[in-house]
Image (tube, rainbow, N blue to C red):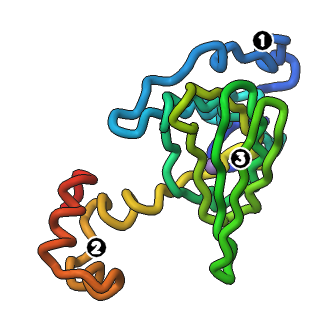
Amino acid sequence: FLSVNGPFPCKPTSTINPADFTSRLLRESSPLVPGLGVAVNLLNVERFPGLNSQGLSISRIDFQPNGLNPPHVHPRASEIIYVIAGEVEVGLIDTSGKFFNATLFPGDLFVFPRGLIHYQSSVPSCTSLSLSALNSQNPGLSLVASALFGSTPGIPDSILAKTFSITPTQVEDIKKAFGGH
Ligand code: MN
């Protein structure tokens, strides 16, 4: 019979082979995100079916100098980052509004607890490379700024204007930067 974990069916046991547990998709960087100078190559269960039911995923991040993986949350996972090359500034904000940050060098680790807003940025002087492990096969990703200003349909300007104590015109300007509506 077909067993199911979320929307991802498990293969019949008799057909499982070593290739199911192998992925070579982290050999390469993802395309750089224009304007941010960062490339995030996340292998979740969708892209690496062998992760199904294991509660794991992994992400390769390539940074240009000053490259930024902007503030975001993973609703279903904590994240641990390991810096391989370069120098990476990381930060998180806890639910009491306290800011935690660190400068990471090759070999260093930093933990982002589940659901907290965090970011990673390479310093101006070098490119950087990191790996992150996340404790969900489908961590989820919500980029804070583009969620608020680039959603479809858009959040009403009046709501965002009041939230940020800015004018509806300023809201419109920010929305344009995120391709919002
Ligand atoms: Mn993250």
State the image coordinates of residue 180 (x, y, percent, origin top left).
23, 58
The quadrant of the rendering that contains the N terminus is top right
Q: CA distance from mark 2 to mark 3?
A: 35 Å
Q: CA distance from mark 2 to mark 1?
A: 44 Å
User: In this view of the protein, which residue sits in the foreground, 23 or 84?
Assistant: 84
The residue carrying mark 2 is 155
The residue carrying mark 1 is 19
The residue carrying mark 3 is 103
> Is 39 displayed left or right of 23 in the figure?
left
> Is 177 displayed left or right of 57 in the figure?
left
In this rendering, the answer to whether 176 lies above or below 51 is below
Residue pictured at 78% horizontal, 36% vertical: 82
The amino acid on which the numbered mark 3 sits, given as a three-letter code, is: Thr
Q: Nearer the viewer, mark 2 or mark 1?
A: 2
Mark 1 is surrounded, within 10 Å at the Cα level, by few (under 14), some (14 to 19) or many (20 or more) other residues, namely: few
| Residue at the left extreme, as displayed | 169
* Residue 106, picture quadrant: top right
The amino acid on which the numbered mark 2 sits, given as a three-letter code, is: Ile
Circle 3 SS class: strand
User: In this view of the protein, which residue sits in the foreground, 71 or 104?
Assistant: 104
Q: Is any atom of residue 2 visible in this view?
A: no
Q: CB of mark 2 within 8 Å of CB of mark 1? A: no
The amino acid on which the numbered mark 1 sits, given as a three-letter code, is: Ala
Circle 2 SS class: loop
Residue pictured at 28% horizontal, 60% vertical: 152
Q: Is any atom of residue 167 visible in this view?
A: yes
User: In this view of the protein, which residue sits in the foreground, 139 or 173?
Assistant: 173
Residue pictured at 17% horizontal, 63% vertical: 173
Residue pictured at 77% horizontal, 11% vertical: 19
State the image coordinates of residue 165 (x, y, percent, origin top left).
30, 86
| Residue at the front extreme, as displayed | 125
